[in-house]
Image (spheres, rainbow, N blue to C red):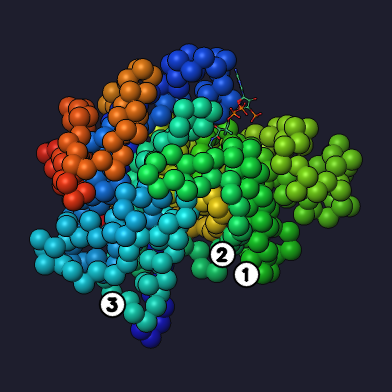
């Protein structure tokens, strides 16, 4: 390759979520917590979940097949397939190898990439692998496909309302309408036991809720500071702040944490602001001039001040990206990319054109990165950005077509998952009646733990890239 490929980024994106959900208001009543704890306190409206008919293989098969169909891509045009997930059904065999069952019938087996795991960060690591491949000497001119998906379920208790499920697939290549900003990535990784899955026989994590929030906010501080430094260097600007970004997307375990995180970016700007500028830029906050970030994770006064100060900017730069996080819940590896999809389907295209969008990806344990993308300015009728948005119009329709399940049934369905996790042989009992067209579902697990799938027929084909 004589020159780097130009404008490497996202050429196509597809997202799926479960066809059933539980309402968070109903769940508050059922769990006997105070009214508003899940809906206002956590900021969640509904939570998508899967019966024993769906597992990580079926979610990824569904999202890949749908993307290929909608965009009319040939399997042979894909040269790398990366999967990011923390929903592990096999300690050796990758989800990627299961996805090969879509490619093999088309004679395609020359396909690099396997799975990447680190809590909710695996999708971002998979994405970076794909970008690196397209920008390397091993790139053969074909697309890379990145799949991030998870089923987020918690044991009964305070973490349960922060579950969710979903998967996203992103086609990566040059001349894209959503371009990764070169040189603008800032990473923070550390050892922590905030959320982990040491019991390999269970789907449920061990969670230290408070520590996970502290780790998330601390990672955000470090990534944002590093990102601003890189912007400063690249643009030769001394004072970079949140105004450098037109929109800001977050890994979204629950929406309230995202709103607090946005406020925290403004706190970071405040801490980095020269002391003599505080009276003019932040009048009345002089007494906080020496505040230390690592002493403020649970400081209610500071949180309240910066939530208030950042409110308008949050509405402008982040609110619209929380649609899927609020309606479906935490999709773990797919979460931050569900925010990108929400932004694309919620903002008028005239506002999206040319936008610079920041993304913060966090995975417990911990691994985190902040980076940015720039959206194309070309929004003419047949532009690539318009096609991506057109292809996503079904998302809002499908959100409204979902079926509401009572908390009693939700709890029973999770019990069935819990009891039969890793059972073999096993025939799933969950209904397939409400599954969306094009959904793969688990038909059978045989006595050797081999899983077989079927697909619900009928998929809309929207157009080409
Ligand atoms: N009306 C309005 N707000 C209320 C009400 C009410 N009736 N009751 C409680 N609240 C508020 C609380 O004040 C609190 O707000 P605050 O955070 O501003 O103080 C919020 O609702 C949550 O209530 P808590 O009592 O703090 O909730 P709890 O400790 O029971 O659980 C937690 C919350 C820790 C997030 C839990 O759901 C959890 O462990 N989730 C999984 C871990 C997680 O998502 N971590 C985030 C990063 S790591 C990751 O992505 C997995």
Dot 1: what SS? helix
Residue at 40%, 60% in the rendered image? 116
Question: Which numbered disc, 1 or 2, marks the residue that appears first in the sequence?
Answer: 2
Local crowd size for mark 2, using a 10 Å CA cut-off: few (<14), some (14–19), many (≥20): some
Q: Which of pointers 3 and 1 indicates the residue nearer the eye?
A: 3
For the residues labelled 1 and 2, the Cα–Cα distance comes to 8 Å
Q: Are marks 1 and 2 in contact (CB under 8 Å)?
A: yes
Residue matched to label 2: 184
Asked whether, in this view, residue 420 is left or right of residue 291, the answer is left
Q: Quadrant of residue 244?
A: bottom right
Asked whether, in this view, residue 231 is left or right of residue 21, the answer is right
Q: Are marks 3 and 1 in contact (CB under 8 Å)?
A: no
Q: Which mark is residue 140?
A: 3
Q: Quadrant of the N terminus?
A: bottom left
Camera sees residue 106: yes
Local crowd size for mark 1, using a 10 Å CA cut-off: few (<14), some (14–19), many (≥20): few
For the residues labelled 3 and 1, the Cα–Cα distance comes to 30 Å
Residue matched to label 1: 234
**In the orientation shown, which residue stands out farthest toward the bottom?**
2
Dot 2: what SS? strand
Local crowd size for mark 3, using a 10 Å CA cut-off: few (<14), some (14–19), many (≥20): few
Q: Are marks 3 and 2 in contact (CB under 8 Å)?
A: no
User: On screen, 380 above or below 38?
Assistant: below
Instruction: Pick the residue in front: 185 or 17.
Output: 17
Question: Which numbered disc, 3 or 1, marks the residue that appears first in the sequence?
Answer: 3
């Amino acid at each position: 390759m004589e020159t780097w490929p130009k404008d490497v980024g996202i050429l196509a994106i597809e997202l799926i979520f479960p066809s059933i959900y539980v309402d968070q208001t109903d769940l508050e009543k059922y769990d006997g917590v105070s009214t508003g704890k899940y809906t206002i306190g956590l900021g969640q409206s509904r939570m998508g979940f899967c019966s024993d008919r769906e597992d990580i293989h079926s979610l990824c098969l569904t999202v890949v097949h749908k993307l290929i169909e909608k965009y009319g891509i040939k399997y042979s045009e894909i040269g790398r397939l990366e999967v990011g997930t923390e929903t592990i059904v096999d300690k050796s065999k990758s989800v990627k190898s299961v996805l090969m069952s879509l490619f093999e019938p088309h004679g395609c087996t020359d396909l690099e990439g396997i799975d990447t795991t680190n809590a909710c960060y695996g999708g971002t690591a998979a994405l970076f692998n794909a970008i690196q491949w397209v920008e390397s000497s091993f790139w053969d001119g074909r697309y890379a496909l990145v799949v991030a998906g998870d089923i987020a379920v918690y044991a009964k208790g305070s973490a349960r309302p922060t579950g969710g499920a979903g998967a996203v697939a992103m086609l990566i290549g040059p001349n894209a309408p959503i371009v990764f900003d070169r040189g603008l990535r800032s990473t923070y990784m550390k050892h922590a036991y905030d959320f982990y899955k040491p019991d390999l026989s269970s789907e449920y994590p061990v969670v230290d809720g408070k520590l996970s929030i502290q780790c998330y906010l601390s990672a955000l501080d470090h990534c944002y500071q590093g990102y601003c430094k890189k912007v400063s260097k690249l643009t030769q600007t001394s004072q970079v702040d949140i105004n450098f970004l037109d929109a800001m997307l977050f890994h979204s375990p629950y929406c309230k944490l995202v709103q607090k995180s946005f406020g925290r970016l403004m706190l970071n700007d405040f801490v980095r602001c020269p002391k003599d500028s505080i009276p003019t830029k932040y009048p009345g906050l002089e007494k906080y001039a020496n505040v230390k970030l690592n002493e403020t994770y649970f400081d209610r006064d500071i949180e309240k001040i910066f939530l208030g100060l950042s409110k308008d900017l949050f509405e402008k730069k982040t609110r619209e990206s929380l649609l899927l996080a609020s309606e479906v819940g935490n999709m773990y590896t797919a979460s931050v990319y569900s925010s990108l999809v929400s932004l694309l389907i919620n903002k008028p295209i005239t506002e999206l054109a040319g936008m610079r969008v920041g993304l913060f990806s966090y995975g417990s344990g911990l691994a985190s990165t902040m980076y940015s993308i720039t959206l194309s300015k070309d929004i003419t009728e047949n532009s690539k950005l318009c096609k991506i948005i057109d292809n996503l119009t079904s998302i809002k329709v499908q959100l409204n077509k979902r079926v509401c399940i009572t908390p009693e049934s939700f709890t029973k369905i999770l019990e069935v998952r819990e009891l039969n996790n890793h059972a073999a042989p096993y025939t799933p009992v969950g209904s397939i009646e409400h599954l969306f067209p094009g959904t793969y579902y688990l038909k059978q697990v045989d006595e050797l733990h081999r899983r077989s799938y079927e697909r619900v027929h009928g998929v809309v084909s929207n157009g080409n890239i």
